[in-house]
Image: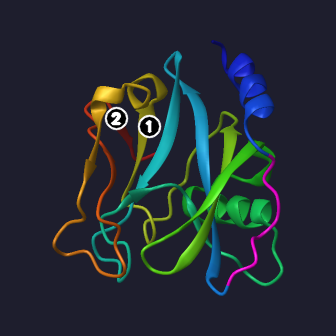
Amino acid sequence: MSPAERDLHLRRCLPSIGDWQPTALRHAAVLCPLLHHDGSEHVLLLVRPGSLRQHAGQIGFPGGMREGEETIEATARRECQEEIGVGADRIELLGGLPARESSSGILVHLVVARLLPGPLQPDPREVDRVLLVPLAELQQEARWQELPPPGSATGNQPRTSPHFTGSGSTPTRQ
């Protein structure tokens, strides 16, 4: 499937992004960026620096806390700009996924988007490195398993959560 065909499919299948859900929790938004790289589709993930006070060494999507009256889309775009230097003009929104409560008491909204070609400029204060994980690998069920949280985990952790064993991730320091 070409990137354009995939984007059309996702626009049809994914729910609209919607509005912030009413909650006593703090709100955050993350962007699940899809990009075409070396002839195939990839998902972009960040590795957080080990020196961070929160989320040290974690792998995740670009994202962060809502500021003021921002929309979900605005929060996701701003965080993507701050963390990897990708401006709003290079982000094509495709849809959203249901919000989830994090172990640190934050309601996180997920936005799926296409990143248009261009340079990445990771902020070293927030990003140790960028991983490009082939979408084909993420679709292999055998690469996923449910695991308990590490012994060092803090907060209200779920008993288990999905973990992906990634061997073909392409680290990049663009």
- Return the x and y of residue 54 as percentages of the image width and height: 38, 79
Q: Residues within 10 Å of mark 1 (few under 14, many from 20)?
A: many
Judging by the rendered image, the residue that carries numbered circle 2 is 169
Q: Is residue 57 above or below residue 17?
A: below
- Return the x and y of residue 170 as percentages of the image width and height: 36, 34
SS for callout 2: loop
**Dominant secondary structure (helix, strand or loop) of the stretch shown in magenta:** loop
SS for callout 1: strand
Q: Residue furthest top?
A: 1
Name the residue at 65% across, 38% down: 118
Q: CA distance from mark 2 to mark 1?
A: 6 Å
Marks 2 & 1, CB-CB < 8 Å contact? yes
Name the residue at 42% across, 31% down: 138
Is 92 or 150 nearer to us in this picture? 150
Q: Is residue 85 above or below residue 10?
A: below
Amino acid type, callout 1: Leu
Res. 103 image quadrant: bottom left
Name the residue at 25% across, 74% down: 153
The numbered mark, 2 or 1, whose residue comes first in the sequence reads 1
Q: Is residue 143 left or right of residue 59?
A: left
Q: Quadrant of the N terminus?
A: top right
Res. 171 image quadrant: top left
Q: Residues within 10 Å of mark 2 (few under 14, many from 20)?
A: some
* Count of picture labels: 2
- Return the x and y of residue 172 as percentages of the image width and height: 39, 42
Q: Residue furthest left?
A: 151
Amino acid type, callout 2: Ser
Judging by the rendered image, the residue that carries numbered circle 1 is 132
- Return the x and y of residue 12 as percentages of the image width and height: 80, 29
Q: Is residue 37 left or right of residue 167?
A: right
Q: Which residues are magenta?
A: 16-23
